[in-house]
């Protein structure tokens, strides 16, 4: 019985080391595979209860695990949609076959890295047929709230290169110095005119006409101006008229003292904004806070538009996309503006090593992994998304070769045990002779 158990133990040792050799071979073969996670074989002893004082060898068994929570080093690339994760979390993807079927069923898989490029339909896809998924943004670039424990809301990320888009102007900041001498008695009373370009909802160039008319008193200085605003898109109609009074006290001289609304949107003394309504919708005009020297001023004898800032741009052609560290996919247009079109969440599970490994370094949720949760990149346990990057294989070739030597020796030793048992059994057979 003891000799037979030795034989069985030797055979189990051969099988165990053959299994370990298979994982070592897989690891070495994928040492250059982006996103590959190292496989590991662990040995566990088998104990058989013996009676009568003898000992029976139980042998060994193996368990295999893919160490999905081990991250490989990141390397830089020249493709903006080569993505990797710095830290915990995985990118949600689906298959190109499921997208092509167009039946609404998009099974989610997870990857830690991928080289995504637009296919013939503009969908970001790897050369192995994995499609990047994300939450679509609204037309204004904001991302609505989506459920975090389901794939509802996720859709293939589609980039339509050569697509045109406009960026309407919604905000202006007006920094102007008005001549203080123009509000003194005896001044000419001529208005100071200013034209500012803005872009409407269709990307068409329009103009805000702003006229500053001084109030000329009979004596002294009024320090008062009437600001009239017209809109070319509304046929030159007046969309706002305001009375501006400036301070002449020591220390605060030349700054806005009060703003009185004659017509149009009201002045907000907390933000310094005037809420205008142009032909295409609302537009906030910031003229500065009361008493703020960085806002509108009335000093000296010169009319000077010191600083005029505005958002918006004319119609632009989409030339590319980039993904920032928060997972936002930003479309870049040739006129200089960018717009968020998707957000890529990061999926996390309690036990990443419990995921089911699939081909092409992708993984699937399983009961052992636990349920997934979709995090914003950089929030909670999730790491950040790194564009222009790929994750290299987690294989340490030197370590694998060292284990290969150990495995070879262990296999040979188990084979020697079998050979020895065979010789002992032969001796036992020879006793009869």
Image (spheres, rainbow, N blue to C red):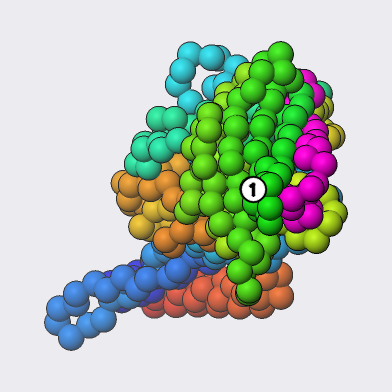
User: In the displayed structure, would residue 94 be above or below residue 36?
Assistant: above
Q: Is 184 colored magenta in this rendering? A: yes
Q: Residue at x 66, y 38 (%)?
A: 227
Residue toward you, 167 or 144: 167
Quarter of the image where the N terminus is located? bottom left
Q: Residue at x 60, y 17 (%)?
A: 100
Q: Which residue is at the far left?
A: 52
Please state the total of marks drawn on the protein image.
Answer: 1
Look at mark 1 in the image and give the residue it sits on: 224
Answer yes or no: is residue 401 visible. no
Residue bounds of the magenta highlight: 178-205
Q: Residue at x 63, y 74 (%)?
A: 251
Residue toward you, 114 or 183: 183
Q: Is 417 colored magenta in this rendering? A: no
Residue toward you, 107 or 139: 139
User: In the displayed structure, would residue 188 be above or below residue 27?
Assistant: above
In the image, residue 11 lies at what x, y percent?
45, 64
Q: Residue 215 occupies which quadrant of the picture?
A: top right
Quarter of the image where the C terminus is located? bottom left
Answer yes or no: is residue 260 visible. yes
Q: Residue 164 occupies which quadrant of the picture?
A: top right
In the image, residue 290 lies at what x, y percent?
55, 57
User: In the displayed structure, would residue 385 be above or below residue 207?
Assistant: below
Under circle 1, the secondary element is: strand
In the image, residue 321 lies at what x, y percent?
74, 39
Other-residue count near label 1 (Cα within 10 Å), few / some / many at <14 / 14–19 / ≥20: many
328 relative to 351 in the view: left or right: right
Residue toward you, 14 or 109: 109
78 relative to 257 in the view: left or right: right
Q: Residue 331 occupies which quadrant of the picture?
A: top right
Q: Which residue is at the far front?
A: 218
In the image, residue 430 lies at what x, y percent?
44, 74
């Amino acid at each position: 019985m003891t000799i037979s158990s030795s034989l069985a133990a030797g055979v189990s040792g051969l099988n165990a080391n053959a299994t370990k050799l298979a994982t070592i071979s897989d690891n070495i073969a994928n040492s250059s595979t982006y996103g590959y996670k190292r496989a590991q074989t662990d040995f566990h002893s088998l104990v058989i209860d013996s009676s009568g004082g003898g000992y029976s060898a139980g042998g060994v068994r193996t368990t295999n695990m893919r160490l999905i929570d081990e991250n490989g080093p990141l390397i830089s690339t020249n493709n903006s949609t080569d993505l990797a994760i710095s830290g915990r979390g995985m990118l949600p993807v689906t298959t190109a076959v499921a997208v092509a079927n167009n039946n609404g069923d998009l099974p989610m898989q997870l990857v830690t890295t991928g080289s995504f490029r637009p296919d013939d339909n503009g969908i970001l896809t790897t050369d192995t047929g994995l499609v990047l998924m994300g939450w679509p943004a609204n037309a204004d670039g904001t991302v609505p709230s989506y459920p975090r424990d389901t794939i509802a809301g996720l859709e293939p990320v589609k980039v339509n290169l050569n697509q045109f888009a406009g960026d309407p102007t919604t905000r202006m900041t007006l920094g102007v110095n008005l001549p203080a001498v123009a509000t003194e008695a005896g001044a000419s009373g001529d208005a100071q005119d200013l034209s500012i370009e803005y872009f409407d909802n269709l990307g068409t160039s329009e103009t805000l006409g702003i006229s500053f008319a001084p109030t000329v008193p009979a004596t002294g200085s009024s320090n008062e101006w009437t600001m009239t605003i017209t809109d070319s898109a509304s046929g030159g109609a007046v969309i706002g008229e305001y009375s501006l009074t400036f301070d002449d006290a020591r220390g605060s001289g030349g700054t806005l003292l009060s703003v009185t609304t004659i017509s149009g949107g009201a002045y907000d003394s907390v933000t310094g904004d005037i809420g205008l309504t142009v032909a295409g919708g609302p537009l906030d005009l910031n003229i500065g806070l009361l008493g703020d020297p960085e806002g509108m001023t009335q000093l000296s004898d010169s009319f000077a538009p010191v600083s005029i800032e505005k958002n918006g741009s004319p119609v632009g052609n989409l030339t590319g996309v980039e993904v920032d560290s928060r997972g936002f996919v930003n479309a870049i247009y040739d006129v200089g503006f960018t717009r968020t079109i998707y957000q890529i969440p990061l999926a996390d599970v309690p036990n990443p090593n419990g995921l089911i490994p699939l081909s092409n370094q992708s993984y699937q949720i399983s009961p052992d992994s636990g349920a997934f949760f979709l995090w914003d990149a950089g929030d909670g346990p999730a790491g950040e998304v790194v564009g222009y990057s790929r994750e290299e294989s987690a294989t340490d070739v030197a370590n694998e070769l060292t284990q290969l030597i150990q495995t070879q020796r262990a296999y040979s030793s188990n084979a020697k045990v079998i050979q020895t048992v065979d010789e002992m059994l032969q001796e036992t057979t020879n006793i009869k002779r």
